[in-house]
Amino acid sequence: MTDLTQAAAQPLLKVRDLVKSFPVRSSGFRGGRGLVHAVAGVSFDLHQGQTLSLVGESGCGKSTTARCVVRILDPTSGQVEFDGVDLGTLDAAALRSARSKFQMVFQDPQASLNPRMTVGEILAEPLKIHHIPGAEGRERIRELMSLVQLRSADLDRYPHQFSGGQRQRIGIVRALVLEPKLIALDEPVSALDVSIQAEIIRLLERLRDQLGLSYLFIAHDLSVVRHLSEHVAVMYLGKIVESGTNDEVYEQSAHPYTQALLAAAPIPDPLIERSRDRIVLAGDPPSPIDPPSGCHFRTRCWKAQDRCAEEAPVLADPGIGHLVACHFPEVSNVIVQQPVDFRRPT
Amino acid sequence: MTVADESSVDDFQPQPAEPDPGRKRSWRKLVRRPQIAFGLIVCFIWLVVILTVHWWAPYDPYESVGDRLQPPNGDFWFGTDALGRDVFTRVLYGARQSLPIAVAVIASAVLIGSVLGAAAGFLGGWVDRVVMRLADVTMAFPAILLAMAVAAALGPGLKNGFIAMVIVWWPIYARLLRAQVIAVKQREHIESAVSIGATQGRILRKHVLPLSFTGVLVNATMDLGQVVLLTASLSFLGLGALPPAPEWGAMITEGAKYFYQWWIAVAPGVAMVTVVLAFNFLGDGLRDALDVKAATR
C-alpha cells in the first residue's frame, strides 16, 4: 500500500482509524456492560483495479472490517472514504444510492440468497431499488449470467435448486449487477468444496480483469490470498499487524504473528513439510472484550519483553519496505508454499 | 487447494430447468395423505352446510316441530329437545354460529398479533419490551378465565365473546412471529438486502415476513378448532350465544339438564369433534407443506 507508483493517484477506498465495538452484557448475577473491540483502529488504502486481502484467524475482526467498509455495519469511529466521499457524512437516502458502487459477496451462498425468491427476482431487486430501467437491467443480467456460465433458464428457479458453487455464482452476479467499483468478498470460497473453490477463484480473477473491479478479499486460506491479491494485511485482535505487497509479506515477514501464521499453512510436499521449522503459538487469542495492554499479541509471542506490555507498537516501516507493528521486527525466512497457479495449464 | 477440477467451468451442465417441480409435487402428495384428505373433506362439507342449509334443512331451528324429548327416529334423525325442536336442524344451523366466529377471531388475532409481533421483533428496543410485557400479562391468565372475565364485564352475547377471544389469542401470534422475525433477521440474506440499498420497510416486507409467516399460518389453522371449543365453552357458561340461538355450546348446556336424553348434548358435541379434528389435521398438513427447511435444504 506504500506503493510509490500509486501514491500520487487517489485511492478508491481510504480507511482511516476504523473502530467498531459491540456492546455485550457480561454473564453473572451483577453482569455489567462491556464492549467487544472487534476492530480497534484499522487503516488502509485500496486502489482501483487492485485486490487487498485481509487475513487472520477467526475473530480477528476481518469480516467486521469488510462489513463496516460496505456499511452493513456502522463503524463506531473512524473514516471510510470511498471515491473521495466520506461515507459517514452521507444521510440515509444518499448512502442507499451510493451503495450501488460497493457491493459484498458473502461466505454462505445458501444463507445469503432469499429462499422465497427466484434467481430472477433476486437479481432484479437491486436494479429495481436503484431505478434502472427494465430493458437495460435485463440486458445486464443476461450478460452477467453468461459471464458466470449460468443459463437464462435458471432465472426461474429457486436458490435451493442449485449447487453450492452455482449459488455462489448467483451471489456474485447479484453483487455485480449494479456495476460496482469495489466488491468486498467475505471468505467467498471457504464454504465450498475444494474443487469448486478453484473454479470460483478463477472466475473472480477473470471478472476483476474484465470489469476492472477492486476486491477487498477476506480470507484465512493463505494460498488463495497469495494467488489473487496484490496486497496483504494481516490482522490480529482487531488491528493490522503487518501489511505490504504479497511478496513482502510472504517472503520477508517481520511480525512474529505473520510468521506463525505462514508456518501453520500446510505445504503439500512431505519432504519440505517434515524438514521445516514449526512455530506453534501457545493458547488462544485473548478476549477482545479485555485485550492485553500494549501489544495485543504479547501474550502469545515468544519475543515479548517488558516494553511490549507498556507500549503499543505502531504500524510503521522498520526499514524493510513494508509496514509492521512490532517492537522487535525481524525478517525471517519462513518456508512458505509457492504460489498456486489456479489458471489452467496451457 | 488443488487444481484438480480444471474442467468444471466449461463442462458445466445445468440440470434441465422445470418451473419449481418440487413444490407442486409436494402439494399433490399432501392431498393424498388420509389425514389431510379427511381434514379437507370435512371442512368442505361444513362450508357447504353453512352456505346452503337454509334451502334443505328439514325443519326450522327455532320452531317446535314435534313432541318434546323424542329419541332419534326416522322423522327426527337426532331426536328432539326439551322444546320439541329438531336437534339435527339445530346442529346444522349451529355451524353458522361457530365457524364464522372462529374464522373472524383467528383472522383478527393474527392481524393484531402479527403487526405487534413483527414490530417487536424487527424494531427491538422499547417497542419489543412494551409489546412482549403486554403479551406476558395477557398470557399469564388461563385462556378460559380471561375470556370469561372479559365477556362477563362486557355482557353476554357472541359479539362480546368475539372481543374476549381476540384478546386471549393475539399474544400467541405476536410471540410466534416475533421469534421467527428475530431468527430470520440474523440470516445473511438480510445483510445482502442492506448492501443493495433496500429500505427497512422493503427488507421487512420482502425478506423477513415471507420467511417468518409459516409458523403463524400453521398455528392459526390448528387454533380454529380451539376457538370453536372456546366459543362453545363461553356459550355453555352462558356468556356467549344466548338462547334460543342454535349454538353448539348453548345446546350442550340445555342437553346437560336432560341426562337420560343423551342425544341433545351428544349431537352438537360430535359436530364439534369433527370440526376440531379437521382443523388439526389441516394444520399438520400445512406445516409439512410449508416447511422451509425441507424446501430449501
Image: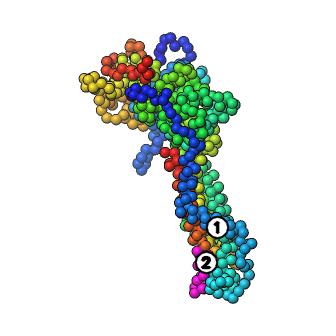
Could you tell me which chain the residue with mark 1 belongs to?
A: B
Please name whichever residue, A214 or A56, is drawn nearer the observer in this view of the structure.
Answer: A214
Asked if one can make out residue B30 in the rendered structure from this viewpoint, the answer is: yes
Residue at image point 45% right, 27% down = B7
Q: Which residues are magenta?
A: B252-270
Count neighbours of disc 1 (C-alpha within 10 A) and say few if under 14, some if 14 to 19, many if 20 or more: few
* Residue A168 coordinates in the image, percent (x, y): 51, 34
In the image, is residue A108 above or below residue B248?
A: above
Task: Report whether A318 appears left or right of B152.
Answer: left
- Dividing the picture into quadrants, the one containing residue B246 is bottom right
Asked if one can make out residue A171 in the rendered structure from this viewpoint, the answer is: no
Amino acid found under the numbered disc labelled 1:
Ile
Kindly identify which residue carries mark 2: B267
Examine the structure image and report whether residue B186 is included in the region drawn in magenta: no
Mark 2, mark 1: which one is toward the viewer?
1
Residue at image point 71% right, 78% down = B58
Amino acid found under the numbered disc labelled 2:
Ala
- Which tag, 2 or 1, sits closer to the chain's start? 1
**Farthest residue toward the left?**
A275
In the image, is residue B110 above or below residue A328?
A: below
In the picture, the quarter occupied by the N terminus of chain B is: top left
Q: Secondary structure at mark 2?
A: helix
Examine the structure image and report whether residue B261 is included in the region drawn in magenta: yes
Tag of residue B284: none
Residue at image point 31% right, 20% down = A335
Q: Secondary structure at mark 1?
A: helix
- Dividing the picture into quadrants, the one containing residue A254 is top left
* Residue B279 coordinates in the image, percent (x, y): 58, 64
Kindly identify which residue carries mark 1: B45
